[in-house]
Amino acid sequence: AQSVAQPEDQVNVAEGNPLTVKCTYSVSGNPYLFWYVQYPNRGLQFLLKYITGDNLVKGSYGFEAEFNKSQTSFHLKKPSALVSDSALYFCAVRGNYGGSQGNLIFGKGTKLSVKP
Amino acid sequence: DGGITQSPKYLFRKEGQNVTLSCEQNLNHDAMYWYRQDPGQGLRLIYYSQIVNDFQKGDIAEGYSVSREKKESFPLTVTSAQKNPTAFYLCASSYGTGFSYEQYFGPGTRLTVT
């Protein structure tokens, strides 16, 4: 089955500390992976994507993500968290067969809370 | 939220009434999507359209209908047949449906049905 798992409902980090938001995926073939951020009562904003190439992908607002094929993971990272990074983060994978082919399959989201 | 607009931001309806949510984009994107977001459930795909005058059902299409008469517009109608319509609805678009294309989202419409 094609799926995305975000194992943590919430991640708490102190401002200035590094942050990691975890994502694992299950899809046959080459994965196409995406991270989005959602602020309260707003739409989703695209952060970054992995299509092919370098396993470390850099995106918007200082975020980066590391693709690990053997662990089927695509964790989102930032070296130094800001209070303004507090939001809901979604990982997504592009489905590549059946009724989900070409469509994004989203995880349930991880709420990031950065305290001053 | 880019060049995608959704209106209204908040919508209240009585049970048994149909309601139409607007989605317009000026990004010249071919593909458009409707998602439903419920707390703790992520996003679920309702309908999508790859081209004008064509659309396909997503994972939870029952009780919803769409049209795509113009490239810029993809309205969603929540019918009285939808058993639990109260949710946050998000419209998105992408340049194409190729695997590498990211989707861009509108600001959403929060629908409350009582």
Image (cartoon, rainbow, N blue to C red):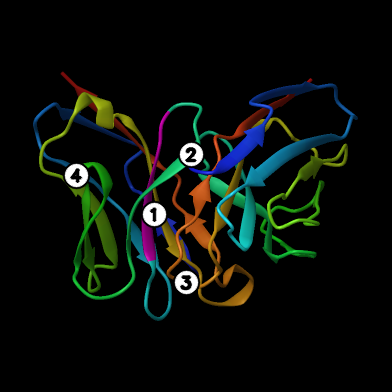
Work out which quarter of the rendered image holds the C terminus of chain B and state it: top right
Direction from residue B113 to residue A4 in the image, left or right: left
Query: How far apart are the alpha carbons under marks 1 and 2?
Result: 25 Å
At mark 3, the secondary structure is loop
Which callout, 2 or 3, points at the residue further toward the start of the chain? 2
Identify which amino acid the numbered label 4 is placed on: Gly
The local secondary structure at tag 2 comes to loop
Q: Name the residue under label 1.
A: A5
Residues behind callouts 4 and 2 on a single chain:
no
Q: Nearer the viewer, mark 1 or mark 3?
A: 3
Q: What's the chain of the residue with tag 1?
A: A
The one nearer the camera, B62 or B91, is B91
Q: How far apart are marks 4 and 1 (CA)?
A: 23 Å
Residue furthest bottom as drawn: A29
Task: Return the residue nearer the eye: B58 or A54.
Answer: A54
- Kindly identify which residue carries mark 4: A62
Separation of disc 4 and disc 2 at Cα? 19 Å
Q: Which of marks 4 and 1 is nearer the N terminus?
A: 1
Q: Are marks 1 and 2 on the same chain?
A: no
Q: Distance between the residues labelled 2 and 3?
A: 21 Å
Q: What stretch is highlighted in magenta?
A: A33-39
Residue B47 place in picture, x, y as percent:
70, 56
In the rendered image, the vertical position of residue A16 relative to residue A115, given as above or below: below
Residue A92 painted magenta: no
Q: Where is residue B81 in the image (x, y as percent from the top left)?
A: 87, 41
Q: Mark 2 points at which residue?
A: B1
| For discs 4 and 2, the disc positioned in front in the rendered view | 2
* Residue A94 position in % (x across, y down): 47, 66
Which residue does the numbered mark 3 point to in the structure image? Answer: B99
Is A3 situated above or below B84? Answer: below
